[in-house]
Image (spheres, rainbow, N blue to C red):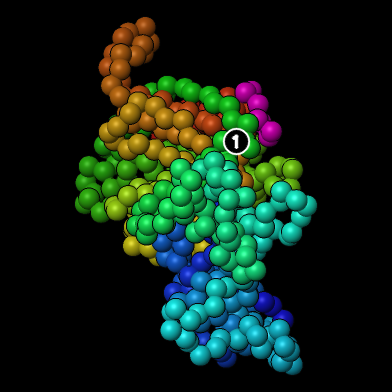
């Protein structure tokens, strides 16, 4: 019997709201099928199943806020018999919907009671309290069993008086989630940075020729070349592609580059292109358009939010000359690419105007060093200057 649980879709995700089920009891599902939609601080995410089987029961009702790791459904493998009802299973079944004010708060993961001075609080509440400089000792927990939750920290005492917590917009919530993740990343990952200014005139000239007779919807953008170059370079220089988990680096078998997407209402997400090194240039461009479209309409998949192996953030055609990104854990590298700039450049002894970009690789010093990072940057430069081979 497989228990389908609320997945973690971000380093600071504490719970998600079940928006809708896309299956019902009795439906057959296959690994990779989207079976539910969950609302998080980063928008609505489509949740995939990771096993084959038949949906036996749905243990959470739409509209419920479900903590990470709590059951959402029971899925039976082929030939497996339904389990006998148990008190625990019965308790987990949906109950008649009560008015909002009468709903019981879901159980949250809490820290066990400890010695004097140790205050029971959810993990996310502890992180938020540290960021804001809030003393947990002054808070009264409103969670199950008196545990301190995020809402308690957000309404923490200021100047000796408890301040009411004002409702935040989705963009504000997303900004807080991003800030919390990046703060922890900066505090726990020993970043180092390598920058290189690279001549991209060959790539721009190549795209001008390639796009000349194509309608706008079929043209390839410079960003697609960047994604291809990063993907191929990462597949060769494997030390930048993977995850640092449980105190060790685990290289990835494929390259799933997370592509930073600015949302129209504000905020940022970085969903992954799955196995991008196996795509050609046209496939990469089509996949990027699809990813951006779904990111901006709130229909990303859970795997796209959790299985990235390296991240690319680009400023597009206009903007600052350079940027250094913060690594998104558990990844070990992020590539920041500034907007193209026209600069004097020496070609065969002659100074000529060229379009150049500044690439900055932010890398995890627990995993790689300057020499290995420089190999990645050099490989990227070689690839982007030979765009016909991308």
Q: Main secondary structure of the magenta part?
A: loop
Q: Pick out the residue farthest to the right.
A: 115
Q: Pick out the residue farthest to the top.
A: 349
Q: Residue 181 location in percent, x, y?
A: 53, 46
The boundaries of the magenta stretch are 365-371
Q: What secondary structure is found at the residue carrying circle 1?
A: helix
Does the magenta run of residues contain 108? no
The residue positioned 21% from the left and 46% from the top of the image is 213
The residue positioned 47% from the left and 86% from the top of the image is 98
Residue 133 in view: yes
Seen from the viewer's position, the closer of residues 356 and 41 is: 41
Q: Residue 196 location in percent, x, y?
A: 47, 22
Q: Residue 104 location in percent, x, y?
A: 54, 78
Seen from the viewer's position, the closer of residues 359 and 134 is: 134
Is residue 272 rendered to the left or right of residue 252?
Answer: left
Q: Is residue 342 above or below residue 336?
A: above
The residue positioned 35% from the left and 36% from the top of the image is 315
Quadrant, the N terminus: bottom right
């Amino acid at each position: 019997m497989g228990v389908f649980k609320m997945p973690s879709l971000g380093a600071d995700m504490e719970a998600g709201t079940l928006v809708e089920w896309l299956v019902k009891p009795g439906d057959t599902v296959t690994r990779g099928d989207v079976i539910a939609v969950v609302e998080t601080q980063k928008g609505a995410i489509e949740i995939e199943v990771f096993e084959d089987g038949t949906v036996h029961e749905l243990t959470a009702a739409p509209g419920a806020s479900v903590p990470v790791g709590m059951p959402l459904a029971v899925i039976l493998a082929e030939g497996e018999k339904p389990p006998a009802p148990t008190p625990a299973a019965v308790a987990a079944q949906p109950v008649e919907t009560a008015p909002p004010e009468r709903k019981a708060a879901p159980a949250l993961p809490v820290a066990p009671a400890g010695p004097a001075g140790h205050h029971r609080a959810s993990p996310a509440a502890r992180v938020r309290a540290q960021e804001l400089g809030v003393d947990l000792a002054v808070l009264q927990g409103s969670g199950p069993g008196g545990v301190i939750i995020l809402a308690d920290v957000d309404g923490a005492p200021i100047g000796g008086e408890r301040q009411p917590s004002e409702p935040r917009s989705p963009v504000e919530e997303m900004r807080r989630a991003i800030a919390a993740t990046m703060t922890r990343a900066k505090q726990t990952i020993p970043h180092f940075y390598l920058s290189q200014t690279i001549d991209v005139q060959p790539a721009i000239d190549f795209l001008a020729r390639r796009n000349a007779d194509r309608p706008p919807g079929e043209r390839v953008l410079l960003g697609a070349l960047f994604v291809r170059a990063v993907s191929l370079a990462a597949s060769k220089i494997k030390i930048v592609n993977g995850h640092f988990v449980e105190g060790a680096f685990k290289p990835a078998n494929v390259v799933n580059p997370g592509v930073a997407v600015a949302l129209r209402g504000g905020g940022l997400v970085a969903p992954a292109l799955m196995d991008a090194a196996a795509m050609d240039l046209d496939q990469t461009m089509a996949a990027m358009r699809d990813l951006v479209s779904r990111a901006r309409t709130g229909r990303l998949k859970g795997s796209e939010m959790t299985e990235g192996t390296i991240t690319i953030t680009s400023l597009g055609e206009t903007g600052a000359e350079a940027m250094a990104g913060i690594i998104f854990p558990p990844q070990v590298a992020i590539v920041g690419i500034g907007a193209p700039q026209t600069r004097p450049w020496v070609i065969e002894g002659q100074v000529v105007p060229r379009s150049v970009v500044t690439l900055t690789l932010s890398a995890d010093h627990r995993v790689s060093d300057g020499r290995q990072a420089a190999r990645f940057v050099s490989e990227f430069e070689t690839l982007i200057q030979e765009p016909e081979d991308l």
